[in-house]
Image (cartoon, rainbow, N blue to C red):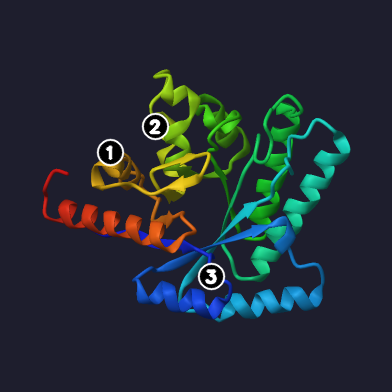
Amino acid sequence: MKHPILACCNFHPTAADLKEFTLEHGFGGIDWTITLDKVPANAAAEAELVRAIASLAPLEVRYHLAFQGVDLGDEDPDKAKQARRVFTQAVRLISKLGGRVVTIHIGGLGRDSSSDLCWPTALEGLQGLVQFANRWRVRLCVENLAWGWTSRPELFEKLLRLSGAWATLDLGHAQVSPVVQSGLYRVKDFVAPHPDRFVNAHIYHEENDHGHEPPADVSDLEPRLRLVGSLPRCDWWVLELREEEALLKTLAVITEYFRLRDHGREV
């Protein structure tokens, strides 16, 4: 059975160190996170980023925008307009870098409440951003978060269906979603209505107050990995841990999962 591309995050300080680590441990790609403070501020900074990304060849690079506190659905019209501007500039940058896939968040990243967000504004902003990304030949993906709109499968489904966005399934976020923890939904409900829209997955055990936690063994992830493996277009698995020990521990678990699966053995 064909294996997905395993990717790691850009957690090393230099592109050279990152590439060396990635190749040494058998990763096939890099999921490059851009935060607000890392958006190039001028042409020289942009050119430097272009060179860094080019140096990672032949590894595939996909992108992840982690813009804390910036949301397309902000109820403040000026802030919503600024969010649209920031995201469109980022999509344009990613296209210039040769990127074809980007993941964004909507409905709560960096906030402790959704009371200052507006659903119609969010949907309109997302629809516009998807159309803009399409023109730049970039697939725009929405990630499910641990809380907020996208932590609820029924709202996540609506955002994808009504906007035309692609999707990224975050296994750790789905695991700790309040509606999953309560038993109202199951992790598989995030993908059931639209399995063909998922092109990326974030792989780790769960998110808590300390961050992303690695699995202890295969049994921690096995049902969710089978779910991700059933998604027809989800060929990009990001081991989303930024500490080397936790990342390599997760890599060992994934490698063991593939070994058991390829030999037709139950985990």
Q: Quadrant of the N terminus?
A: bottom left
Q: How crowded is the residue under tag 2: few (<14 C-alpha within 10 Å), some, or many (20+)?
A: many
In this rendered view, identify the residue nearer to me: 70 or 193: 70
| Label annotation for residue 223 | 1
Q: Secondary structure at mark 3?
A: loop
Q: Are marks 1 and 2 in contact (CB under 8 Å)?
A: yes
Disc 3 from disc 2: Cα separation? 31 Å
Disc 3 or 2, which lies upstream in sequence? 3
Task: Give the residue at x 73% y 42%.
Answer: 69
Left or right relative to 148: residue 21: left
Which x, y percent locates residue 49?
A: 67, 74
Q: Is residue 182 above or below residue 231?
A: above
Q: Is residue 262 above or below residue 178?
A: below
Task: Give the residue at x 62% y 37%.
Answer: 163
- Amino acid beneath label 3: His
In this rendered view, identify the residue nearer to me: 186 or 25: 25
Mark 3 highlights which residue?
Answer: 12
Left or right relative to 153: residue 109: right
Q: Quadrant of residue 105?
A: top right
Disc 1 or 2, which lies upstream in sequence? 2
Mark 2 highlights which residue?
Answer: 187
- Amino acid beneath label 1: Pro
